[in-house]
Each structure stands twice: as structure tokens, then as C-alpha cells.
Amino acid sequence: MTEEFASYYNRRILKPPTWREVNIGGYLYLGGLAGASSVFAAGGQLTGRPALARVGKVAALAGITLSLVALVEDLGRPARFVNMLRTFKPTSPMNMGSWLLAAYAPLAGVSALCDLTGKLPLVGRAACYGAAVIGPAITTYTAVLVSDTAVPAWHEGHREMPFLFAGSATATAAGAALIATPRSENAPARRAAVLGAALELAAGRLMRRRIGMIAESYERGRAGSLLRAAEALALAGTAGALVAGRSRALALLSGAAFMAGSACLRLGVFSAGVASTEDPRYTVVPQRNRLSAASQDRDRQYA
Amino acid sequence: MTAARSIPVATRLPQVQEETGYPEHPPRMGFFTDTSVCIGCKACEVACKEWNLLPSDAPFELTGMSFDNTEQLSGSTWRHVAFIEQRKPVKAPDGAGDQGQGSGDQGSGDLRWLMASDVCKHCTDAACLDVCPTGSLFRTEFGTVVVQQDICNGCGYCVSACPYGVIDKREEDGRVFKCTLCYDRQVDGLTPACAKACPTESIQYGPVDELLQRAAARLQELRQDGVADARLYGHDPADGVRGNGAFFLLLDEPEVYGLPPAPKVTTRDLPSMWRHAAVAALTLACGIAAAFATARR
Ligand code: SF4
Ligand code: SF4
């Protein structure tokens, strides 16, 4: 691997994302919280854990509402948000995501409102299961959204990113459940939180190993600090969750750690992406390596 | 130098209008920018700004790095002239001294200037167009890529998708802007403003297949003159974007000019991304289901 590279006065080649970190980092986080919470809600409903089901439904509605606000507020022309739905375009993950949200948000809304008001229980139950079917897609489509760009840190990580986001979403939704559900009903959340954190840690490590020098954008600067905090919080949350069956206070602390860790992870991934566009190294060096690998292949072929 | 090898250059770029579904269309039009004759006068930058009524890039600042104070393409700069001041021993292979090529300074040994007018590449596989969620970006009958300003909602997805860092958002406006290849002039059969203004024919406009032939001939000529560094960029339908409607003749590596050496349209990996996302979504659902199934009361 060569580390020497030429550039135009060390200026960046790519344009950094125009997205604001709070809005889009927040959008990734809240979408994850909502989607995975819907799955918890369905699980709670199915296994007779009404408190857990309610927490899941409310978290899903709150998450998806806030994430939509964050998304629309980030547009240069918010009033034109509906233009996302003037076409159906499978090559655009943002377009597909808009359709997913258009299907999911009403289900999450009906599910939560029926539960809270006690009206139309059957409709509410059906909406809850519907939201749980779409929920997992809401948590991982955002990985495709960021990976389907020229941003080196995001694009090159496109294989692991959905697993990273799925793990982080599971952990944060479980965290919300740990905070707001009584001990008698939080056993599934404790287990899922540990699974989610493990998936998040493993996918993150694997991604950084596989993307070569681009991994530096995840390790340095603001992104590095955020991601180290995310790992520490996930580990602390896991430790708490393993013993949280015994105490409500421990469950609260552990849940908060998972939620904060997941938020740091999303913001860290966002920062790493921005950093990887600002330094031409992350554009030139991997592309040069790709070119020389291709020419070696050719040489082998004709040798 | 021994007789220059002949350099294979594709003679045809993909007929992208047919792929888009135009039953009838004019030939695919584009630019060939021959940087070896660029004198860095910036007439193209000015002509583009004037014709397209582009706002100034405030605040004006001197970069201090070269005569280039424009720095980059942006929402309000659709042609950008790069200036590269190089200390590079540029000797012909027989050791006869300076090549005296293009913009080189013959008297001063190893100092040379490279100048190049950059522009939107009007990619065959255009990432900006692929990812645009509103359909605001579209393929014209000339095979170029243009933003419909009445539809763009300023989501910025195209900005992150372009592998060349071309398209950008005007913060004060909220929408994105880039080169249209002077679509309004094209429909009237006129040459785009930059090519019209270029005094050295560094910027050439025409049907891309014709331009490709011209580019191949020019490359051959320069190689025969001993300019071993000369190369084409963006002309190859086998590259990561299936070739550009605007391609270049360069005198050094692309990255020296601020161009990516091997760009790839991001959507080529999209099927794999969706597959991974689907498996990850299933993993999440199964994981939470397993947590419920094994949890004791
Ligand atoms: S260079 Fe960028 S902005 Fe121009 S067509 Fe290609 S992807 Fe789009
Ligand atoms: S900013 Fe405008 S042109 Fe670019 S992807 Fe969004 S809607 Fe399309």
C-alpha cells in the first residue's frame, strides 16, 4: 500500500456533505430508535407484556416524528419535501426511504395512539404488527442511504454499515425499554440490548479492519472521540444489563448508557464521513491502490 | 524516442439517450478540454458566469497557493481553471532538455505550469442523477445531466454522491446548481459559452464521438513530440462511470489537477448494499425475537 500521493495543493476532491450533523446524525439515530422499538412493541404485545409494548409504541412514534422533523428541516427547500414522493425511484435510497417512512409513520402513529387512548384496540394491534414488519427496514435503510455516496468512509463500509446500524438500533431501543419498563417485563430488553451491543461492536471492528487506510477517518479527531465513547458506553451498558434484573436503578443506568452510546455512534459515523471527504488522501490513495491492483491482475492474466 | 506506440482509444461512448428512453435524439454532445493548450486566461470562467447569471463567490479571498483564487467548482462556479506550479524535471527521453510543451516555461529548467479548465463531467453513469430522490436531475436529449430548479428540494444527496465533487448547494438559495452544458444555448444550436469564449480552443464542444477522435489524434501527436506524460481522462467507456461526456487531455496524473484517479459511480454497488441491508434487518428482527423467546418471566 502506498501512502504517498499527489494532490491539487492538498485541496479536497469531494464536496463534504451539505447535511447538518445534528439533523442527519440525529435522523439516523432516531430512525433506528423508532424502527427497533416497533419490534419490541410487537414482541411485548404478542407475549403479554403490556408495559413493554406501550414503551415500544411510544418510542417508535416519538422517534419517527422527531426524525421526520430533523430530515425536513435539513432540506434547502423544506416546503418541497413532498417532491420526494412525486416519483418512485429504486436507484435513490432517499426516495425509497421516503416511501418506507410514508408507510411506516402512520402505522407507528395509529399503534401508539390506540394504545394510549384505549380506542380501537384491534386496529391498534394490527398497526403495531404492521409497524414491526417495516421497522427493521427503517433501521437499516439509513445505512444504504449514507453508503450510496462517494463519501469514502461511508461507501467503502457499505457491507458492514447495515449491521452496525441494526446493532445500534437494537441497543438504543432496548435502552429505552430498560429505562421505562418495570423489572417484571424488561427481561427481553436486557437480552436484546446485549445482542445489539455485541453486533454493533463486531460490525464496527470488522468494518474498520476491512476498509484499510480509510479506517483512520473513524479513529481520528472528533469521530474517533465519539466512537470511542460509543464503545465504552456500549460496554458499560452491557455490564449493567447483565445484572439489571436485580435492580431498577441499574436498569435505568444501563438503558441510558445504551441510548447515549448509540447516539455517539451515529454522530461518530457522520463525522467520519465528513472528515473523509475533506482530506484528498482518502479519495486518492484507495483509488490508486485499486488501479494498481487492477493492473497487477492484468499482468498476471497475460503472464 | 522510439516511434510512439499507438494508443488505443475507444471510438464511441455509450448512447446514453437511448438507455434513458429517448426514441429520437440529437447526437450525444460534450466537451473535450485539451489542457495542453490552456493559457489560464479564465475566459471560460467569466463567460460561464455571465451567460448563466451566476452569483459571485463571496467573499473574495486570495488563496496564496497559485494564481487560482477560485479554488473549486461550486454552485456558483461551473468552470474552474486550475493552476499548478510544478518543479518537475521534464526531459524528453533522449535527454535533449525541456519538452517545451504547452504551457511550460522553457527557460527555467524544471519549472512548469499546468493549467486546466475543469467542469461537470456529464457522466454516462451519473451518481448525482441516480440518487436524486425527486427526479429533479434528469438526462437531456443531448445526453447531458441537468438540474430542474423548479423541482429540486435541496436535499443535498447529489452533492455527496458525485465522485468528482462537482455539484454543490448554494446556501443562500437552498438548492443545488451545476453546469448545464448551456442547455438553453444547445437547443438553439449554439456553442456553450465557455467553449465559445476560449481563445485557444482548449475547450472544444461537439458530438462526443467526434471529440473522441480528435482527442485520440491530439494525444498521438503529443506522444510523438515526446510528451510522455500526456494522457486522456474520462474518455474510457470501461471506467467506473462508463466514460464522461466531458473528457480531458492532461499532462500529469489526474489527482495533480484535483481530479479523482479512478472514480466509480456509487450506485454500481447499490444491489449489494440493499442485500446487506435486508440481511441486517432480518438479523435485527431475529435477534429481538430470540431475546423474547429465551427470556424468563
Ligand atoms: S460529474 Fe458529478 S455532477 Fe457532473 S454528471 Fe457526473 S456525478 Fe453528476
Ligand atoms: S439536492 Fe435537488 S437535485 Fe440534488 S438530489 Fe436533492 S432534489 Fe435532487
Image (spheres, coloured by chain):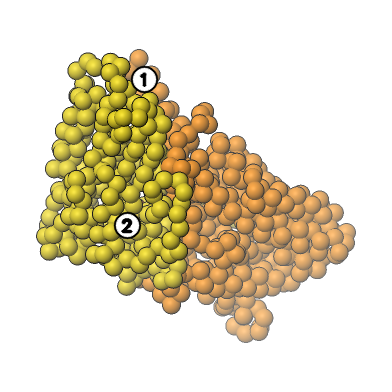
Residue A118, position as x, y percentages in the image: 66, 83
Residue B211 sits in which quadrant? top left
Please state the horizontal and vertical placement of residue A158, each as a whole percent of the image.
51, 46
Query: Which residue matches tag 1?
Result: A299
Q: Residue at x 85, y 60 (%)?
A: A250
Q: Is residue A4 visible?
A: yes
Res B202 quadrant in image? top left
Q: Nearer the viewer, residue A169 or A10?
A: A10
Subunit of label 1: A
Chain A, colour shown: orange
Q: Is residue A254 above or below residue A107?
A: above
Q: Residues within 10 Å of mark 2 (few under 14, many from 20)?
A: many
Same chain letter for marks 1 and 2: no
Looking at the image, which is closer to me, B18 or B284?
B18
| Relative to A100, residue A171 above or below | above
Disc 2: which chain? B
Task: Locate residue A300, reporting x and y percent.
Answer: 38, 19
Q: Amino acid at mark 1?
A: Asp
Identify the residue under disc 2.
Answer: B78
Question: What's the CA distance linking mark 1 and mark 2?
Answer: 39 Å
Q: Which mark is residue A171?
A: none
- Residue at the image position 60 percent from the left and 41 percent from the top: A216
**Amino acid type of the residue tagged 2 in the rendering:** Trp
Tell whether A298 sits left or right of B292.
left
**Chain identity for the colour yellow used in the image:** B
Q: Is residue B215 above or below residue A19?
A: above
Q: Residues within 10 Å of mark 1 (few under 14, many from 20)?
A: few
Residue B154, visible in the rendered structure:
no
